[in-house]
Image (cartoon, grey):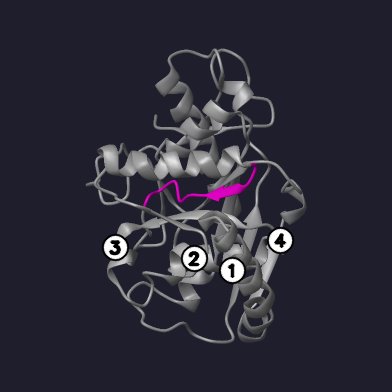
Amino acid sequence: MTESAGANKLQARSRTIVKPIANKLWTIHQEGYERLPDDGPAILCPNHISFLDSAFLMLTVPRNISFVGKAEYMDSWKTKYVFPALGMIPIDRSGGEKSQAALDTARAVLERGELFGIFPEGTRSRDGDLYKGRTGAARLAMDLGCPIFPVGITGTDEIQPIDAKMPKLRKECTISIGRAIKPERYRGRGPEHLAWRSMIDEVMFEIREMTKQRYHNRYSGEPEVEPTQPSVVANVGDEHAEGHRHLVAV
């Protein structure tokens, strides 16, 4: 049995066993799940406000998801073996070749026709706001021709706030799956890196629409340097982005 097959079976088994228990402990509202394809590759891009975000998403989506997680989880005996077995791909957030190795593994997941999940913000928001997305997911989507589904999560930060050791019971959260953002719309619209940026900006716009979070046009952890005017909806390229929007600073 391959490592991937073992992880898939363990994740499916865990979903069968753990989901009924989770549903007794918390109320997890699900919206837009019918938008997800029954088969074939796709990328899920959620906002990140709690340790539980990826776990709740993996429990509620009917297909297995390989999810990027911070490499620090491999340093703890509590998560070193369980998280990778459930489909987590460790990523070194220092960037460069180490981060690229995780994206190469993600590429293999998508080429097998599976689901891949990644937090575009890169790390949890400590203040509950939404931050500028990194372009790794857009690069994969455009290279492989697969859609990105924005995912808006609310309420998990009330279940397990930042730095809390244990989750609170009998709380509610909502996970919303947005409409697919397809890479074909961005091809041939200028330099490749600008196409990646436009695509991931649209992802973040759709997440903001679902979560109603305050948006910062800077990466999480960077100092506040954005202008005082709010972000606005813009067109993609020279043509109106019919039905799709993205964020720019004005």
Q: Between marks 1 and 4, how big is the CA–CA gap?
A: 14 Å
- The residue depicted at 42 percent of the width and 41 percent of the height is 103
The reply to whether discs 2 and 1 touch (Cβ–Cβ < 8 Å) is yes
Q: Between marks 4 and 3, how big is the CA–CA gap?
A: 28 Å
According to the picture, the residue beneath numbered tag 3 turns out to be: 72
- The residue depicted at 55 percent of the width and 55 percent of the height is 2
Mark nearest the camera among 3 and 2 is 2
Name the N-terminal-most of marks 4 and 3: 4
The reply to whether discs 1 and 4 touch (Cβ–Cβ < 8 Å) is no
Q: Position of residue 63 (x, y in %)?
A: 68, 57
According to the picture, the residue beneath numbered tag 4 turns out to be: 62
Q: Position of residue 95 (x, y in %)?
A: 27, 42
Disc 2 crowd, CA 10 A, few/some/many (<14, 14-19, 20+): many
Q: Is residue 7 visible?
A: yes
Disc 3 crowd, CA 10 A, few/some/many (<14, 14-19, 20+): few
**Disc number placed over residue 85 in the picture, else none:** 2
* SS state under label 3: helix
**Front residue of 101 and 154:** 101
The kind of secondary structure the magenta stretch mainly shows is: loop
* SS state under label 2: helix
Amino acid bearing label 3: Glu
The magenta stretch spans which residues? Answer: 113-122
For residue 33, above or below residue 226: below
* SS state under label 4: loop
Residue 84 appears left or right of 59? left
**Front residue of 172 and 34:** 34
- The residue depicted at 65 percent of the width and 72 percent of the height is 13
Disc 1 crowd, CA 10 A, few/some/many (<14, 14-19, 20+): some
Amino acid bearing label 4: Pro
Q: Position of residue 175 (x, y in %)?
A: 62, 62
According to the picture, the residue beneath numbered tag 1 turns out to be: 10
